[in-house]
Amino acid sequence: MNQQLVNAIRNRKMIEFDCGGHHRVAEPHVYGRNGGAEQLLVHQVGGGSSSGGLPEWRRVDVPRMSGLVTLDDTFPGPRPSPSGQHSRWDETYEIVI
């Protein structure tokens, strides 16, 4: 488990990281395990992405993340998902409240 991600979620701190060839700025919302993979659900608000515009929800494979930085900027808390509910997780380590 990545304690830096847990702390960022608990403290509602924005994060930045690189993944999939893009630098990303995001609000971390759910950190856990799904389908055996360690994943992070973020609301990406800045940086780049090859899968659509921003802001947008993204599920990121944590082992593919690099250069993780916790920013001083905070976010207000949970956001509604487009479908009205977030997807299921096998196990959650931390969720924004």
Image (cartoon, grey):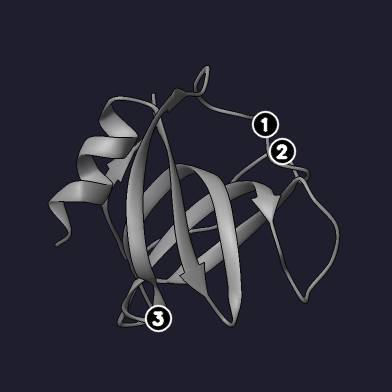
Q: Quadrant of the C terminus?
A: top left
Residue marked by disc 1: 80
Residue 50 is left or right of residue 31, and the answer is right
**What amino acid is found at the position of numbered circle 2 in the picture?**
Gly
**What amino acid is found at the position of numbered circle 3 in the picture?**
Arg
Instruction: Give the image quarter of residue 17.
Output: bottom left
User: Marks 3 and 2, how far apart in space?
Assistant: 28 Å
Which residue occupies the foreground of this view, 44 or 38?
44
Residue marked by disc 2: 84
Q: Nearer the viewer, mark 2 or mark 1?
A: 1
Q: Quadrant of the N terminus?
A: bottom left
Residue 46 position within the rendered picture, expressed as x and y whole percent measured from the top left: 68, 48
When the figure is inspected, residue 73 is found, relative to residue 29, above or below; the finding is above
Residue 95 is left or right of residue 53, and the answer is left
Residue marked by disc 3: 64
When the figure is inspected, residue 58 is found, relative to residue 46, above or below; the finding is below
Q: Residue at x 33, y 36 (%)?
A: 9
Instruction: Give the image quarter of residue 12.
Output: top left
